[in-house]
Every structure is written in structure tokens, then in C-alpha cells.
């Protein structure tokens, strides 16, 4: 299965998502989006495919969101996209694209919705939270 993750290795949620993909037996294409941001057209497409709004795809925490005045409700989608492309840390992560869909994997287990049920057993997040049982089934 062709899977792409827009990844930030400094982000625990992104690391957990990447490892869940690998636990499904898939080695994804990993794009460190801070070094290689998506094109405007591709970002717009991923946001739409994930069922998000542009504002819903912006990361606020740990970014210059407030300093740049991006909380202004009068800003247009184009203005928000301009900011995201100028400063990719504003793109919320991780975005994951598979043939089964596109998701902003927050929380990380959201990625399970767009992966095949081919998990190699139990999986726990970095903080110890168990996500999959010994049979690779999602723990609800």
C-alpha cells in the first residue's frame, strides 16, 4: 500500500503515527514537511481530502500563530495558506495520505481508519498508552 506521511520527527504524535503505519507492515514515504513543504495545490487537496477547513489545518501550539495575528477571523483561506506555506511549522501534523483516505492523525490512532488491518500485534504509544492489543486489534 502506498502511504505518505507529512512528518515532523520532533513531534511525539507524528512519531507515534509513523510507528503505527510501520506496525501495519507498511514502510511509508516520509516527507519531513518542515524541510520539504507541500505545494499550495497539494496542501489544499490534502486539507479537502481530510475533511478539514484551512483554519482547522493550522497548528497553533508552538508556532507563531498568535504573533502573526492568524487568529483574526477576517483572514481568508488564501491568507492562511500563504502563512502556512511561508512558515510550514503552521501546518498541523501529521497528515497521512493512503488509498483509503487522508487524515490529520491527531490523535495518532486516527491513522488506523485509513490503514489496512494488517497490524503485527500489540502497539503502545511512546507514553505507554496501549492502542492495539496482542492480535493487532484496536483498543477502544
Image: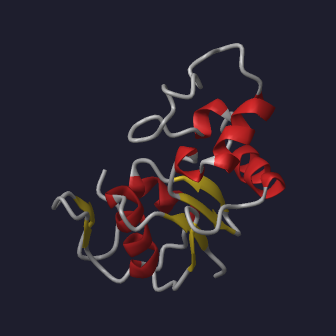
Q: From this view, report whether residue 79 is shown above or below residue 17.
A: above
Q: Residue furthest right?
A: 41
Q: Residue at point 40% right, 56% down? A: 109
- Asked which quadrant contains residue 70, the reply is top right
- Asked which quadrant contains residue 73, the reply is top right
**Relative image position of residue 129 (x, y in whole percent):** 20, 57
Viewer-proximal residue, 99 or 19? 19
**Relative image position of residue 32 (x, y in whole percent):** 54, 69
The image quadrant where one finds the N terminus is bottom right
34 left or right of 120?
right
- Asked which quadrant contains residue 84, the reply is top right
**Relative image position of residue 98 (x, y in whole percent):** 65, 68
Q: From this view, report whether residue 12 is shown above or below residue 60.
A: below
Q: Residue at point 63% right, 31% down? A: 55
Q: Residue at point 59% right, 52% down? A: 88
20 left or right of 101?
left
**Relative image position of residue 29 (x, y in whole percent):** 60, 80
Amino acid at each position: 500500500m502506498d502511504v505518505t506521511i507529512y512528518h515532523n520527527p520532533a513531534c511525539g504524535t507524528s512519531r507515534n503515527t509513523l510507528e503505527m503505519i510501520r506496525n501495519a507492515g507498511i514502510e511509508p514515504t516520509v516527507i519531513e514537511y518542515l524541510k520539504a513543504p507541500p505545494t499550495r495545490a497539494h496542501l489544499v487537496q490534502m486539507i479537502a481530502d481530510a475533511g478539514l477547513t484551512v483554519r482547522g489545518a493550522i497548528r497553533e501550539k508552538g508556532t507563531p500563530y498568535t504573533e502573526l495575528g492568524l487568529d483574526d477571523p477576517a483572514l481568508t483561506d488564501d491568507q492562511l495558506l500563504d502563512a502556512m506555506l511561508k512558515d510550514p511549522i503552521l501546518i498541523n501534523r501529521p497528515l497521512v495520505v493512503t488509498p483509503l483516505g487522508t487524515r490529520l492523525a491527531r490523535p495518532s490512532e486516527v491513522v488506523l481508519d485509513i490503514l489496512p488491518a494488517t497490524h503485527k500485534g500489540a502497539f503502545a504509544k511512546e507514553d505507554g498508552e496501549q492502542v492495539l492489543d496482542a492480535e493487532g486489534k484496536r483498543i477502544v
